[in-house]
Image (tube, coloured by chain):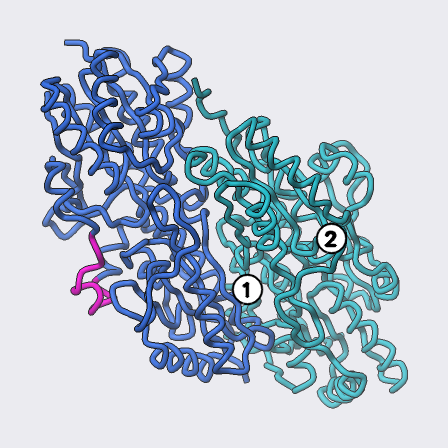
Chain colours: A blue, B cyan
């Protein structure tokens, strides 16, 4: 039976969110009717719909390997009235199936839309497709987008560390701030390519623990003593032992984290006579086209394909999750997880097993970023 | 005749400075005696020398494709007494030839060392090999390091612009700050991959002109009106119409530029009710291993090889410069330019021909960043 399907992308884009869209569209467009919801939930609330003709389909498929969201995404908080109105809109457009590619906020919104459609007695099939660079979505081993972002963070930390080592008579301390919100997955990835003690990072500060100034200064002093420089990676969500998260702004009810690296810069300058710079890795983490992980790209496409397959089979009210196979070599199975479970799980942080054992985390992470990253020789010994 | 050669790297590293070192070393190590000067001019002043045995040579050659300086580099201002002492040191070590890979400051230091060796009547052969990401070295069409940095800036501006476009309901203005010191070569490269009007950047602010607040606001307002967002690229060396360059710090007598993007962020926030973020592209510009331009890498190696060839032929007191062939297809000849000329030329800015004609600049730039960068389809039209 031909279905009327509406699909959108929401939240911050990733380097592979369009791969999921392309995988989904390619599997369905010949047998079903597709409507694209532009600009995420804002588009749903305001009927920014686009019927998928041949040219539009072609455009979406052309975006498969391109960062950013082909349909537009963004952050938009649906009000209760907005949700009720959205369901009425979907009914007016005779939509059978609503699909969104997104993270925690998206799955929560889909779950509310589900409840509202039940209330309105409108039989709406709902599917969520995961994406997040922060990897804080529960109910899944990991989400598409994270592998590429982690690859970017690991690779630039290594490269910047190499750069800083050669500049030790000019600049001694560099504080690098990563994305990740309240979870340390991305920051912890910064150490993946460290091979020698002098390699960066020399210390990682994760949001799962509060930041003790004395411990931080100890690590910085030790790295300067041993290697001439200290490169510290800090997650945007880190709090000082006494204090709150550092936020730049507040938009659509969501705090825009950022600035803890600058506070650390100032703290170091107060304690030590060294040159210090702080640097946010910024938007590149989720948009860099040359750091896409082959594994991440492949899985992103598969998530779209699997969602299309479940859609045809009338699966509803679930998100496509990735589960690791138990075998020793890396492999993935796709399992439905109910939206309610995702919502109940909330933000997923870095588990204690990985906080306590960095090597265990790296082993878990390695297949996601791709095995093709080159190793680095040590620099010449000074004499 | 076997020569005793001392070589060092100075200034900020680039993604290909080790390619020049490897090209040079590979051409000479079998027939000549090599000494590596560690940590740039600091190492020359403080006798941080390393005799090149087989293992050290192997280590240097292994670094050929790796960012950062294998020998250590850094900024160090040689005093007059330091220069006199350096020449005495070179004489003590019976060095026939001194070679440094560096930028304007390096060529100036080499020129002074030349004059001092004349004064001390010590016959010292001196060669400079160019490198700079800022492309502000005169007497050459361009310098190794710039092509890769320009490629990085062009590619991330495109990627970030794509990301911002999809987030227009959350974030409207992004100010991106590039390196470049007093010259706009790098910032101007940010527009190289722009294909459609909505693509980023929407406006570029170069240090060759002072910044008029009203003109800037006009461009930001127009981009927001037309595309929902505005992405502005600004060079670290830009001054407000009334005011000075924004510096973070001062180290070894050199001002550390940075912060104009943050000032623009505040200025926009004062004038408009929009979400604005500023972002420094940071160290990545000169150290990103995955954005190395194939042309840049090849030319960096050649600069080292050509320097080695001239060294054997007793050429002295010059820098290896790259001159474009007059034919329609891209090609390079290597020409010696005297160190005195380089010093007299001073910092090379973006010429008026390129300031007035962006397309002419892009045509000049395209071969340097590599022809292999993919083009991007336009995003879906909103409706």
Relative side of A300 to B332, left or right: left
Q: Could you tell me which residue is drawn at 52 percent across and 56 percent down?
A: B284
Looking at the rendered image, the disc whose residue lies closer to the viewer, 1 or 2, is 2
Chain identifier of the residue bearing label 1 in the image = B
Rendered view: B52 above or below B284: below
Quadrant for the C terminus of chain B, please.
top left
Mark 2 burial class by Cα count in 10 Å: few <14, some 14-19, many 20+: many
SS state under label 1: loop
* Res B183 label: 2
**Residue at image location 65% in from the left, 62% down from the top:** B257
Residue A216 in the image: state x and y as whole percent. 37, 77
Instruction: Tell me, yes or no, if residue A335 can be seen here.
Output: no
Percent of width and height locating residue A94:
21, 11
Q: Is residue B255 visible?
A: yes
**Image: B43 above or below B127:** below
In the displayed structure image, the side of residue A71 where residue B116 appears, left or right: right
Place of residue B198 in the rendered image (x, y in percent of width and height, measured from the top left): 55, 29
- The residue under label 1 is B68
The stretch of residues the image draws in magenta is: A348-360
Secondary structure at badge 2 equals loop
């Amino acid at each position: 039976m031909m279905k009327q399907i509406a699909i959108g992308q929401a939240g911050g884009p990733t380097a592979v969110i369009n791969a999921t869209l392309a995988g989904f569209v390619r599997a369905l467009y010949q047998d079903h009717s597709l409507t694209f919801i532009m600009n995420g939930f804002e588009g749903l609330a305001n009927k920014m719909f686009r019927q998928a003709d041949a040219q539009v389909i072609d455009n979406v498929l052309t975006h498969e390997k391109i960062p950013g969201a082909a349909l537009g995404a963004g952050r938009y908080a649906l009000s209760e009235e907005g949700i009720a109105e959205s369901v009425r809109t979907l009914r007016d457009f005779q939509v059978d199936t609503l699909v969104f590619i997104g993270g925690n906020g998206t799955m929560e919104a889909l779950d509310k839309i589900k409840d509202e459609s039940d209330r309105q007695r409108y039989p709406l099939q709902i599917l969520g497709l995961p994406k997040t660079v922060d990897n804080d979505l529960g109910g899944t081993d990991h989400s598409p987008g994270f592998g590429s972002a982690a690859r970017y963070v690991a690779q630039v930390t290594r490269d910047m560390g190499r750069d800083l080592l050669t500049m030790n008579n000019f600049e001694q301390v560099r504080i690098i701030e990563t994305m990740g919100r309240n979870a340390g997955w991305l920051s912890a990835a910064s150490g993946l390519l460290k091979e020698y003690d002098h390699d960066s990072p020399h210390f990682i500060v994760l949001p799962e623990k509060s930041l003790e100034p004395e411990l931080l200064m100890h690590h910085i002093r030790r790295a300067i003593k041993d290697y001439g420089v200290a490169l510290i990676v800090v997650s945007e969500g880190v709090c000082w032992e006494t204090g709150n998260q550092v936020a730049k702004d507040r938009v659509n009810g969501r705090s825009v984290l950022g600035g803890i690296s600058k506070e650390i810069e100032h703290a170091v300058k107060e304690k030590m006579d060294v040159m210090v710079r702080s640097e946010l890795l910024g938007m590149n983490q989720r948009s860099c086209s040359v750091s896409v992980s082959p594994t991440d790209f492949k899985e992103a496409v598969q998530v779209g394909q699997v969602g299309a397959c479940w859609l045809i089979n009338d699966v509803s009210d679930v998100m496509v999750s990735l589960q690791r196979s138990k075998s020793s070599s890396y492999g993935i199975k796709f399992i439905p997880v109910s939206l309610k479970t995702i919502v109940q799980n909330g933000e997923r942080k870095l588990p204690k097993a990985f906080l306590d054992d960095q090597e265990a985390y790296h082993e878990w992470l390695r297949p996601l970023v791709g095995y093709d990253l080159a190793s680095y020789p040590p620099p010449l010994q000074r004499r």
